[in-house]
Image (cartoon, grey):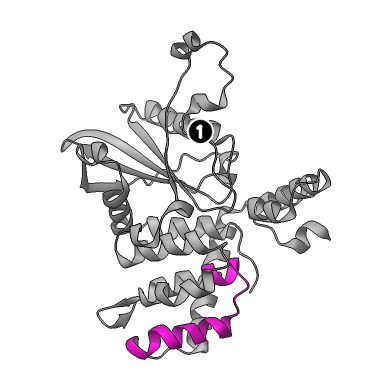
Amino acid sequence: MGKISNPHDKYVKETLSKKENAVDFLKNYLPNEILEIVNLDKLEIEKDSYVTEELQEYFTDLLYKVNIHKKESYIYFLFEHKSYPEKLIGIQLLEYLLQCWKAKIKQKEKLPIILPIVIYHGKPKWNIGMKFSDILEIEDERLKKYIPDFEYILYDLTKYRDENILGTENLKIMMQLLKYIYSDELLKKLPNILKLLLKDGKIDVNTLKTITIYLLSTTEIKLEDFIKLIEENVSKKGGEFSMSTLQRMMNESMEEGIQQGMERGIERGRREERKALAKRMLRKGLDIEMILEMTGLSREDITK
């Protein structure tokens, strides 16, 4: 199966764009001081996109609106996912915040508070400060009060123990797959992760479809081996699943993805830009595995 462009982003967005999963994440992981003032029962997914062409390489554009103290005053939660440390994350987040606020001004709406949430699961250690001001060279502390500043909430999944990953089955599946996707332990962990697909004795077909595409587009796992894992850990309790069934489900998803790309009409141009950038990075001596992860390209794209 060919590699899907930005499969990690696609998987996170597909999971967290479902309201129940977003609410589940926020209830289990937000700081208590925030949970005490927001009304998650009234959470709404923001339909407007504030991602410019320049920001498309960085953001999946997951934005949610909630009431504060049950009143018509809002906090927006911006979800962003990273699979490698991004030193300029503060700049990227600030650009997004500004785009959102500019749109609200044009719509003659109040400017909302926006809390950026970053989910990280890459191999390298995330050693970047969580304040915008951390990327600035501040020679004198007295200058700080003149600098615009904000802080993002970081969830580094590489530091979470399995028993501390909370939530419903769908959320646990996403969090654990992201945690182990680069790990040598993935194959050992998959049986227990797949067992979470069972709900009331039946297989959650939609989630199975999503994680099948994700795993086959990000790992070396073959479809035949994945089928065997499902048969051994899930099918015996939740009904039979054949290779043809999974293959059909994947084909349907791939067709949907291609259609969406055609509708956007930008993927070809963006891909050529990524290839040119990747080759420049390779010539400069950057690690090829890091380049592949950053660009979503295949090794053949970069080396041919």
Q: Which residues are magenta?
A: 214-237
Q: Residue at x 57, y 81 (%)?
A: 223
Secondary structure state at the residue bearing disc 1? loop
Which class describes the residues within 10 Å of circle 1: few (<14), some (14-19), or many (20+)?
A: some
Between 12 and 119, the one lying in front of the other is 119
Between 86 and 14, the one lying in front of the other is 86
Residue 281 drawn at (x, y percent): 77, 45
Between 43 and 231, the one lying in front of the other is 231
Main SS of residues in magenta: helix
Image quadrant containing the N terminus: bottom right
Residue position for label 1:
129
Q: Residue at x 75, y 52 (%)?
A: 275
Q: Is residue 25 magenta?
A: no
Between 250 and 92, the one lying in front of the other is 92
Q: Is residue 218 magenta?
A: yes
Residue 131 drawn at (x, y percent): 46, 29
Residue 137 drawn at (x, y percent): 59, 19
Q: Is residue 288 left or right of residue 283?
A: left
Q: Is residue 92 left or right of residue 176?
A: right
Q: Amino acid at mark 1?
A: Gly
Q: Residue at x 35, y 73 (%)?
A: 196
Image quadrant containing the C terminus: bottom right
